Amino acid sequence: MAKEDKRIDILRAASRVFYLRGFEGTKIDDIAKEAGIGKGTVYEYYHSKQELFDKAVSYNREQYIEQVKATLSQDGTLRDKFIAFAKYQTELVKTHIPIFNMMCTSKIIAREMGALMLEQNIRVAEILTGLVKKAVDQGELREDINPEMAAAVMIGTINQYSSKKVIFFDAQPEDIDYEQMADIIFKGIG
């Protein structure tokens, strides 16, 4: 197996173990076992559990950004893309609730993850801002729309409404009315 493939296998195994056991509950032995390798092999690639955690988070963040790009590059109107993104984001949040719990219970993780999540949100906002600009140029949206603000409204709506519902109120992603969310954003409330 190529060195880069082994590195990625270790990152994926680490992600699964951190997801299930949290940072404090994870041992390098657990990650090695999950990856089907010896503990020493893990240390050939990563010097510490903290480094491995940081790299796993970065790897998963990049995977997330690629999936967001794929979701938002589908054919359709900006409204269609918003709905697809809202569904993807809500499903992702629902399936990764243990990560949010880990962030809430670990002060070290919360501090470090906060900065990483902010960077991730900025990148997603940049992608959405570009799509809003394109929609304005194509006459799909009004010319007086501030693309950066519109992207923030879209992300904020998803985070404050659907993500909150699945995290705190145990709603299922299919229970969310994505059409109504899109109507409020694209038709307004006034």
Image (cartoon, grey):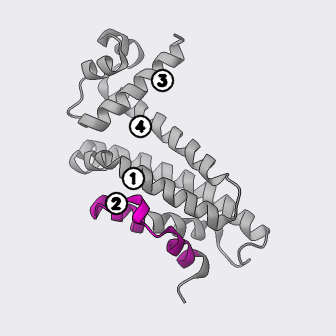
* 105 left or right of 161 in image: left
What's the residue type where badge 1 is placed?
Val
- Give the residue displayed 57% in from the left and 82% down from the top: 188
Judge depth for marks 1 and 4 and give the one in front.
1
What's the residue type where badge 4 is placed?
Val
Tell me if label 1 and label 2 are in contact, CB under 8 Å: yes
Secondary element under disc 3, as helix, strand or loop, is helix
Quarter of the rendering containing residue 10: top left
Secondary element under disc 4, as helix, strand or loop, is helix
Judge depth for marks 2 and 4 and give the one in front.
2
* 146 left or right of 163 in image: right
Residue underneath mark 1: 93
Q: How far separated are the C-alphas under marks 4 and 3? A: 12 Å
Q: Which residues are magenta?
A: 159-185
Residue underneath mark 4: 57
The verdict on residue 164 being magenta is yes
Percent across and percent down for residue 118 are 45, 52
Q: How far separated are the C-alphas under marks 1 and 4? A: 15 Å
- Give the residue displayed 30% in from the left and 30% down from the top: 17
Secondary element under disc 2, as helix, strand or loop, is helix
Question: Which residue sits furthest right?
Answer: 138
Which quadrant, please, contains the C terminus? Answer: bottom right
Residue underneath mark 3: 8
Judge depth for marks 4 and 3 and give the one in front.
3
What's the residue type where badge 2 is placed?
Val
Among the two numbered marks 4 and 3 on one chain, the one whose residue lies closer to the N terminus: 3
Among the two numbered marks 1 and 2 on one chain, the one whose residue lies closer to the N terminus: 1
Question: Which residue sits furthest front?
Answer: 174
